[in-house]
Image (cartoon, rainbow, N blue to C red):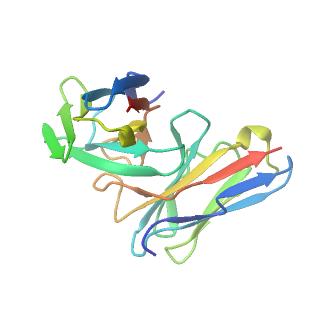
Amino acid sequence: SQQGEEDPQALSIQEGENATMNCSYKTSINNLQWYRQNSGRGLVHLILIRSNEREKHSGRLRVTLDTSKKSSSLLITASRAADTASYFCATDTTGGFKTIFGAGTRLFVKA
Amino acid sequence: GAGVSQSPSNKVTEKGKDVELRCDPISGHTALYWYRQSLGQGLEFLIYFQGNSAPDKSGLPSDRFSAERTGGSVSTLTIQRTQQEDSAVYLCASSPGTANSYGYTFGSGTRLTVV
């Protein structure tokens, strides 16, 4: 089963609106990462938040992490058509080598 | 190079043939990963290399799949006797160290179609 699960599976918003995507996971983690994928090819690393951090910002991106609820959220403010992509959360496991990706949220921003 | 390079970008092969997919990671990145992504799905972990050794091969779907890494750099994923269910995008990623501390840099992937 997936370590990380994104919610919603798909999201459609108007340009200028904010987009919020959620991720839940099952086991203890060292860090959680968010990635963006355009057109089903390579993923781009957006942000990494460590287990001892609660919030992190990068430009229009805001990520929160609640380890007690085993959940994270990615907020994109003032969305643009170019933000249209699939967004994945990814978690390592404490002591593990690999990073497990969820199934992703497909975001569509209408101009 | 400046990024992770994968070749070929697209490969169409007949069922039963063998294929080799190549990944050239960022220079100096010791960790290298292979993932597989079927259409509209998330990423499925295949194998992880630290240097030339593979501490975790748990994701390889069958013994038709193998991978090696030489010189702590280029990696090759080989699929023998390809089947139609092998059709997917194969993604390679590298990282400066272990997965736990760094984000990955992904290549653009190889889209494999088995006909």
Say if residue B3 shows up in the picture: yes
Q: Is residue B102 above or below residue A25?
A: below
Say if residue A3 shows up in the picture: no
Q: Is residue A66 above or below residue A89?
A: above
The x, y position of residue A105, in whole percent, is 41, 29
Residue farthest to the front?
A: A111
Q: Quadrant of the C terminus of chain A?
A: top left
The x, y position of residue A49, in whole percent, is 22, 44
The image quadrant that residue B94 belongs to is bottom left
What residue is at 48 percent from the left and 65 percent from the top?
B4
Decide which of B101, B104 is in the foreground and name it. Answer: B104
Number of numbered labels in the structure image: 0
Left-right relation of A8 to A61 = right
Decide which of B20, A21 is in the foreground and name it. Answer: A21
Decide which of A86, B43 is in the foreground and name it. Answer: A86
Left-right relation of A23 to B89 = left
What residue is at 85 percent from the left and 54 percent from the top?
B17
What residue is at 61 percent from the left and 38 percent from the top?
B38
The image quadrant that residue A20 belongs to is top left
The x, y position of residue B115, in whole percent, is 83, 43
Left-right relation of A34 to A56 = right
What residue is at 36 percent from the left and 53 percent from the top?
B99
Q: Is residue A75 above or below residue B72?
A: above
Residue farthest to the bottom?
A: B71
The x, y position of residue A26, in whole percent, is 34, 27
Q: Is residue A69 above or below residue A81?
A: above
